[in-house]
Amino acid sequence: MKITEVRLGRISVPLRVPFKTALRSVSSVEDVVVEIHTDTGAVGYGEAPPTGVITGDTTGAIVGAIRDHIAKTIVGRDVDDFESLIQAVNSCVVHNSSAKAAVDMALYDLYGQLYKLPVYKLLGGSRKQIVTDITISVNAPDEMARDTQNAIDRGYDCLKIKVGKDPARDIERLAAVRAVAGPDRCIRIDANQGWNAKQAVRILNQMQDKGLDIEFVEQPVPAWDIDGLKYVTDHSPVPVLADESVFGDKDALRILQMHAADYLNIKLMKCGGIYNALHIASLAETCGVECMIGCMLEAKISVNAAVHLACAKQIITKVDLDGPSLCSEDHILGGASFDEQLITVSDAPGMGITGILPGKIEYLK
Ligand SMILES: [Mg+2]
């Protein structure tokens, strides 16, 4: 199966409600789509969101990295030469983890099609279903309470609440959410780097003292502040999950060696795809540290790839793959079925994506 062409396109999917975190506010998913064509007629699909505020990857950067570096490296090569193909993608340009992730998942898609196995089985997995949380954006407490009720009505048992924008009001926001959620639903919070270490410990103590019962806090401090992350992990009553502090396997190794977090958040867009995510999962497994699988604001092609990974690795015990649930339309054919919190992986060979609705992709020259 020889690679003949790499085609790039753009998709735009409106969100049900604007997505607001401590870092940004957006109202639609605007992603780059990659199609890797082969001489057998098989097509591998990939997707990357331009999450400049986290990865530094803009639409132009993703397109440029793939067109000017990665495509030139892989066109003409055989998909069966998989490991050296993936390593060539990783080494042909530094950084650009989103572009690499989009290509990596398309290559896994093709490799699975070549050997007629769904990717999660190719990776040794047997789990067919996972349960995701859903994100509640940062807003006024009454609006967050309304969004919480809406999520509960849609059947979600686990809520991820964005905090960190205005520390003084975070407890008020959480109290409003907990009042609606009741005592039994899981509430996890994501500060998206919004606090400093001592502030985080103080706020988390106050939250637990008020009986808000937080499962864990995600990325309380700036991404670069690993010592601060460790300080919160050592002093907070709430477990800490590292997100923006962990891009690749070397970040994961450092955090694991320092015991700087209780959990790691693996995102394909940060680490550059499934191949690299497997390294992080193995390191975490060695250290007995559970992982969450997360996503950016992504549509179904790339979240579907994360579903295959999550169904393959038991060390991934927490799932935050709500990208498709936040979208108001679905333009992607095939792949996992997203039935609100219940996600069922596809058993079709490769990733199971079969195409994009006509007129919903704008191909780039
Ligand atoms: Mg996060």
Image (spheres, helix red, strand yellow):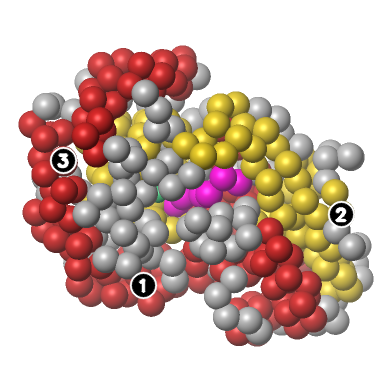
Identity of the residue drawn at 64% across and 42% down: 29
Disc 1 versus disc 3: nearer the observer: 3
Disc 2 versus disc 1: nearer the observer: 2
Q: Which residue, given by chain and number where applicable, does mark 1 sit on? A: 251
> What amino acid is found at the position of numbered circle 2 in the picture?
Tyr
Task: Judge whether residue 340 can be spotted in this image.
Answer: yes
Q: Which residue, given by chain and number where applicable, does mark 2 sit on? A: 363
Report how many numbered discs are placed on residues in the image. Answer: 3
Q: Which of marks 2 and 1 is nearer the N terminus?
A: 1
**Quadrant of the rendered image containing residue 254:** bottom left
Residue nearest the viewer, comparing 217 with 203 = 203
Q: What stretch is highlighted in magenta?
A: 293-298
**Relative height, residue 210 to residue 352 (above, below):** above
Image quarter (top left, top right, bottom left or bottom right) of the C terminus: bottom right
> What amino acid is found at the position of numbered circle 1 in the picture?
Asp
Image quarter (top left, top right, bottom left or bottom right) of the N terminus: bottom right
324 on left or right of 143 = right
The local secondary structure at tag 3 comes to helix
